[in-house]
Image (cartoon, rainbow, N blue to C red):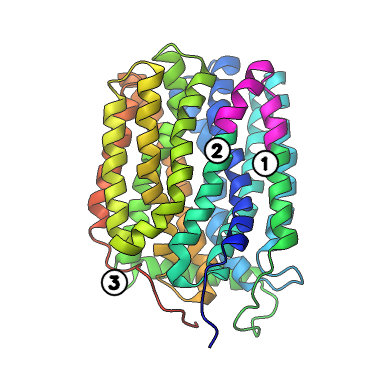
Amino acid sequence: MQRERLSAGKTFLLGLGFFGVSVIWAMYNAYVPIFLKENFNLRSTIIGLVMTIDNILAILLLPYLGALSDRTRTHLGRRRPYILVGSALALVFFLLIPAANAFQRLGLMMLTIVAMNLSMALFRSPVIALMPDITPSRFRSQANGIINFMGGLGALLVFFGGKPLYDRRPSLPFIVGGLVMFASSLLVVIFIREPAPAREEGGRSSLADSFRALGANLKDVFAGEKSLFFILLAILCWFIGYNAIETFFTSYAKYHLGMKESTGALILGFFSVTFMAASLGAGFVAVRLGRNRTIRIGLLAVGATMVLALFLKSFLPLAAAFAVGGLAWSLVNVNSLPMVVDMTTLEKVGGYTGLYYFFSQAANIIAPPVAGVLIDAFGYASLMVFASVLFVAAFFIMSLVRRGEVAERRPA
């Protein structure tokens, strides 16, 4: 029997897909809320709602596309056709965002934003599902650590490299970021070879077949033992906290602390650099302590960091606090997807990856408007309180999860 092993080179190559996705989302969350406030004079509550319209559409696609990719059979494999088409469309619409902003027509801006997010949704679940496709269960935390390292590198490129580009011309980081995302995705399509699925009798997938697969996956969430339900609920909570910070921190820095928005993005860069560096080790921490315990340690630490940041007013202390937060966040984010996919069989990995992103995208819908309402009612300081409460809630929910540690490789 061939010994199972982790292919670090192949995993780093696969991480390019997540690298490109992270470039897009980091830039989108850092600068689009500023566009909406500066050029359209929208209140924070409305900005939060605008930032979720696209996610309402995307949340319906992510679990469906994950299940659909499980059943797809092409000469490119199950996942790569979605990566190729989705990344090409996302490039076009992402490049149009600063152009739409320059016209100062809210309807045009919203159409562009929605089209870009739908394009991103087309390939987000399939690109992440490639990791468990090519990685044995006992190496998935380490592999996810490598992939999250690459994601952190993408965010780092935006927060540090994007500042001089944005200060020169706001459209420049969108042009560079969009091209980097597409080139990264193209390398994944060209060089990653998917393993043949265990069963070929499924043939071509119909729309009805894919929705039936999605329905079966959703039934798993609520039926029987509740570990899957509780971990997805915890994922929802911690991503609400994280996305609230990601969406409004540049606004917090500009309107509450009196910093430039690009400086606020730079502070987020310190979060990303430690996240990136620690991601490589976070999977190994989980091997020693267990995935669940590692996640709970990270949740407590990142929640405490957000409370501390509430009392910090200048660049260096905030950068240091966010650097600690990024380290703690790696313990959470690296080990959560492996827990979810190790609650199912190999043939349903894409569908369960879709469930993971269904709940994380649901957080994108909930977090911005709720955080915006709190900011309008209580001021920007409420942002840090809101996020820390969600991280602590997720900590207690994770104590109810009983499955998701390393599983043996098994067929459907």
State whether residue 72 is above or below residue 265. Answer: below
Judged left or right of residue 8, residue 338 is left
Tag on residue 225?
3
Q: Is residue 409 visible?
A: yes
Q: Is residue 390 visible?
A: no
Q: Quadrant of residue 64?
A: bottom right
Q: Is residue 393 magenta?
A: no
Q: CA distance from mark 3 to mark 1?
A: 38 Å
Residue type, mark 3 in image: Glu
* Dot 1: element: helix
Mark 3 vs 1, N-terminal side: 1
Mark 1 vs 2, N-terminal side: 1
Judged left or right of residue 206, residue 220 is left
Check if mark 1's residue and mark 2's residue have beta carbons within 8 Å: no
State whether residue 32 is above or below residue 275. Answer: above
Foreground label between 2 and 3: 2
Q: Does the magenta stretch mainly form a helix, a strand or a loop?
A: helix
Q: Residue at x 38, y 42 (%)?
A: 327
Furthest residue in direction bottom, as rendered: 1
Which residues are drawn in magenta?
Answer: 158-177
Q: CA distance from mark 1 to mark 2?
A: 22 Å
Q: Residue at x 58, y 69 (%)?
A: 134
Tag on residue 155?
2
- The residue singled out by tag 1 in the image is 115
Residue type, mark 1 in image: Ala
